[in-house]
Amino acid sequence: MKKQRLLVIGGGSTYTLGMVMSLIEEKKNFPLKSITFYDTNAERQESIAKATEVILREKYPELEEFNYTTNKAEAYQNVDFAFVQIRTGGLEMREKDEQIPLKYGAVGQETCGPGGMAYGLRSIGDMIEIINELRQYSPDAWILNYTNPAAIVAEALRREFPNDHKILNICDMPAAIMVSYAKILGKEIWDLVPEYFGLNHFGWFTNIYDKDGQSVMEDIKSAILNDGFLPEDSEIVNDPSWIKTFKQVETMLRDFPDYLPNTYLQYYLYPSQMVEKEDQNNTRARQVINGREKRVITQCETIIREQSTENAHLEVDIHGCYMIRVAASLAYNRHDTFIVIVENNGIISNLQDDAMVEVPAALTSQGPKPFAVGEIPTFQKGLIEGQLAYEKLVVDGWYEKDYNKLLQALTLNRTVVDAPRARQILDELIISNQRYWPAFKTKQLV
Ligand code: G6P
Ligand code: MN
């Protein structure tokens, strides 16, 4: 097996230590020659990298090279795989994205509704720049992108790089949900094969099979209806916010029993409830700053001080493992099935071809080979088409610098609906994103 040279863009992310642990766990499936971290924030990356050096010395002595840098030219050379996980504006801007819509009674969420739009309009430019520059140095590298909001980023990259077939957008949410299904069934996630359709953070499992090809869908549904549903992945198992989110799956299943929903549908199907339970002074961003971020900082300090991982409580998580297994299937032509984001082109036969959809695909060295979904029912189709129009309008708005497109997008979005409210939120987001967004023009009325 050829050993891979891996570049992690966003080395200073709070997810990086979990990724490193996952690379160690998966070293047989995805053997590495080198790991390089790249970040624009030297300080943030340095403590993660210094801790990573200790972890790798202990647990991955056969790795030939580990580097970290803020120099693009150094980082972008000789890459086989680039994992991209950037957050333009950081958690500080995430907090604003969540607080501003809430002020006007709309859902305040990282990737859904106005917050997702705001984050998308910050991410697009940076993502395009990263890919253009990476391609100058490593034209053949696989680029696996986790950067959010994945739906909007994927649509922008589809338009910007129509002929680049080695960019793949992925989200770990379906996998994190499948970890809970696996737990219910007493199996491992890798033993389950999903049937799924939708957009990113906006989809449904229509079936789940075990290794023998038997459907286990009814077992999962009845377990959820009888016993509820909880997160099981190590990263979220004890997190009160994720526990609440997973519990909502039972409600969604009672109201709409045909399929098993992605957890993110709660924001679109129960927006009023979601707004009611939020506290503007302690939105998810604040919880992450006080929770995961502090935990990772402490872990790094402990590891660096003790030059050992013994007291750091490091864990493997699905976020990392999923990305790595995806990479392995692409690298070694394994044809394993993963849920990924690809251009529709008839996969969902009653949806436009140029939609970026989230569906299962066999991942080969030639890229994803998605499985046909066929026609989807009216309810899901209606929801998807509204959401898709919102996503497309956001990306149109970015390319055309068009305020009115953004106003249309937010008015269409199920988390906003009301045009005056859409305008108020948009105007406040423009102010808070001045440093990151292009200047948007409004239509001149005569
Ligand atoms: C899941 C989603 C990601 C999202 C993350 C937020 O993993 O798939 O797209 O960024 O949750 O989690 P957090 O704990 O930061 O709210
Ligand atoms: Mn996601």
Image (tube, rainbow, N blue to C red):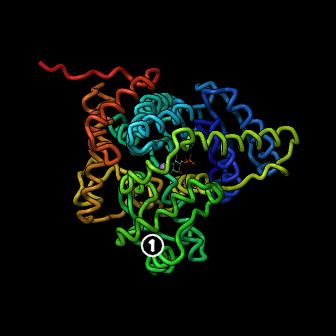
Question: In which quadrant of the rendered view does residue 190 lie?
Answer: bottom right
158 or 233, which is in the foreground?
233
446 or 198, which is in the foreground?
446
Q: Residue furthest left?
A: 446
- Asked if residue 292 lies left or right of residue 141, the reply is right
The local crowd at label 1, few if under 14, some if 14 to 19, many if 20 or more residues have their Cα within 10 Å, is many
Q: Is residue 368 visible?
A: no
Q: Position of residue 214 (x, y in %)?
A: 46, 81
Q: Position of residue 322 (x, y in %)?
A: 56, 56
Question: In which quadrant of the rendered view does residue 66 lie?
Answer: top right
Q: Residue at x 52, y 65 (%)?
A: 178
315 or 81, which is in the foreground?
315
Q: Position of residue 412 (x, y in %)?
A: 27, 43
**Amino acid at dot 1:** Ile
Location of residue 396 with respect to 185 vertically, above or below: above
Q: Is residue 88 visible?
A: yes
Q: Residue at x 44, y 25 (%)?
A: 433
Q: Quadrant of the N terminus?
A: bottom right
Q: Position of residue 402 (x, y in %)?
A: 27, 26
270 or 92, which is in the foreground?
270
In the picture of the structure, the residue carrying the numbered disc 1 is: 208
Q: Quadrant of the C terminus?
A: top left
- Asked if residue 321 lies left or right of residue 310, the reply is left
Q: Residue at x 57, y 31 (%)?
A: 76
